[in-house]
Image: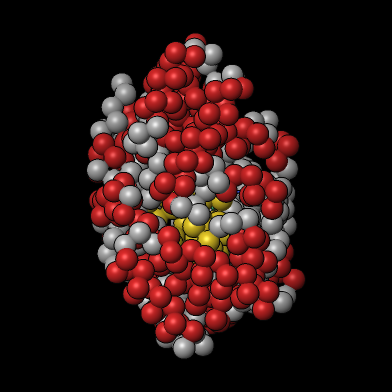
Amino acid sequence: MYDPKSHVATEFISNDEIQATLAYADANKDNVTLIDQILDKARLHKGLDHREASVLLACTLPAKNKEIMGLAKGIKEAYYGTRIVMFAPLYLSNYCVNGCVYCPFHGQNKTIPRQKLTQAEIEREVIALQDMGHKRLALETGEDPVNSPIEYVLESINTIYSIKHKNGAIRRVNVNIAATTVENYKKLHDAGIGTYILFQETYHKQSYLDLHPYGPKRNYDYHTEAMDRAMEGGIDDVGIGVLFGLDKFRYEFAGLLMHAEHLEAAYGVGPHTISVPRICPADDIDPESFDNGISDETFEKIVACIRIAVPYTGMIMSTRESEDIRREVLDLGISQISGASVTSVGGYAGETQADLESNQFDTSDKRSLDEVVRWLMDLGYIPSFCTACYRAGRTGDRFMSLCKSGQIQNCCHPNALMTLKEYLEDYASPETVAAGNRLIDDQIGDIPNERIRQVVAKRLDAIAGGARDFRI
Ligand code: SAM
Ligand code: SF4
């Protein structure tokens, strides 16, 4: 039985409901009257349910698809403006007891060097990341109760927040670790994490079991109910996602939206972020061995339809994607991208062969952070290093109501400009400094509230004079 308020995985992600949704979408994919009604509803910028959004995803009419893409761009602009938040992943350990068949960290891979960072090595990695200009990290580890227990993760978070180096400091640590207990989520919350991120990989239960032949992650229900336990543990910013390529994308899309609806229905707070990773080549993994890979065109349509269905959510794209694809999907809905990412354990500062070869997957976008920042500005975006909301306690429903009210323009826009200014002062190349200062001069007038505009102008001068870490 389908029940979005239930806390039972197979009830809020009901296979019957997904099958019914796919049949409904198939039956209506060329139904212009219905598609127009759905588009009219979407124009209110209040989102769509999984059935409505699945019809848009299935639609094959070129004129309607053009409207869908245009609408996604409009919603992105209305909620997020031209800001793109920057982050980097930090891999702590690649020891793993799970058997995920798509991931080279799986327990039976004997060729990958196993690495686990000491606290001193974490400090070295964090300094390398700070020296690039990063302020926001996503921590990644394999699941291993011996090599990476929760105490190790907590100690690492503490180490990261405590490192102050030149003008650098990591201001927000998001965490992508295996599903765990309410008690451990409480500990992560108390350690001051930003978003707790966990990808479902696939919502299809049988495929999930096939793809996870052994290890604690094999428990579909425990994994799927992880965000419920995270919420119970006090974490109200959670990030969901699937690994596209594992199962049929339309099934995953409906599952993702039902998960978002469940979080709204059960806790009053939808997902803070939705990630859209696609499977990549890796040590002993060939993406061709998974036959559900999606084309770039489908990927773009998925991003657009998620943006329309869940207008308030942050949407994350990693360096799994190439520069070309990143350019195409930025304005369709993406609000956060990683820059200069390394997916090996110790790869930012390390020099040994193991530091370089312990990577999870091959990244496509290999540019430096400075290059990505300048590229974003050349395309008309504002790269943002902002971490203000979470540090001001605007998480969960407080963030969502700010976002839904449209007031984010008086808040995120100034914060983006001020953190970009810090980046320019401390880390950027001369070309990036010139382009960035021009952009800031252009954009300051777009702050709607006059008082805030004046405050920001003063603070930008103060940043040029050496002051740091202002926020609205
Ligand atoms: N071990 C934790 C887990 O599995 O949830 C979190 C860290 S894991 C390093 C982060 C994510 O990497 C996984 O959730 C999976 O979706 C993704 N991943 C694994 N193998 C991949 C591959 N070959 N290509 C792209 N992404 C991959
Ligand atoms: Fe381990 Fe996560 Fe990779 Fe699975 S996806 S093998 S749990 S690191």
Exactly how many numbered labels are in the figure? Answer: 0
Quarter of the image with the C terminus is bottom left
Q: Which residue occupies the foreground of this view, 333 or 50?
A: 333
Picture coordinates of residue 238, whole percent (x, y): 37, 51
Question: Quadrant of residue 240 in the image?
Answer: top left
Q: Which residue occupies the foreground of this view, 51 or 263?
A: 51
Question: Residue at (54%, 23%) from the top-left corner?
Answer: 64
Q: Where is 191 relative to 27, above or below?
A: below
Q: How is the image coloured?
A: secondary structure
Picture coordinates of residue 28, whole percent (x, y): 48, 13
Question: Quadrant of residue 294 in the image?
Answer: top right
Question: Residue at (52%, 16%) from the top-left corner?
Answer: 29
Specify whether residue 135 is in view. Answer: no
Q: Where is 394 relative to 435, above or below?
A: above
Q: Where is 300 relative to 58, above or below?
A: below
Q: Which residue occupies the foreground of this view, 23 or 55?
A: 55
Picture coordinates of residue 272, whole percent (x, y): 38, 50
Left or right, 193 with respect to 138, comes to left
Question: Residue at (35%, 62%) from the top-left corner?
Answer: 411
Q: Which residue occupies the foreground of this view, 122 or 214?
A: 122
Left or right, 38 with respect to 398, comes to right
Question: Residue at (43%, 26%) from the top-left corner?
Answer: 39
Q: Where is 199 relative to 170, above or below?
A: above
Quarter of the image with the N terminus is top left
Specify whether residue 70 is in view. Answer: yes
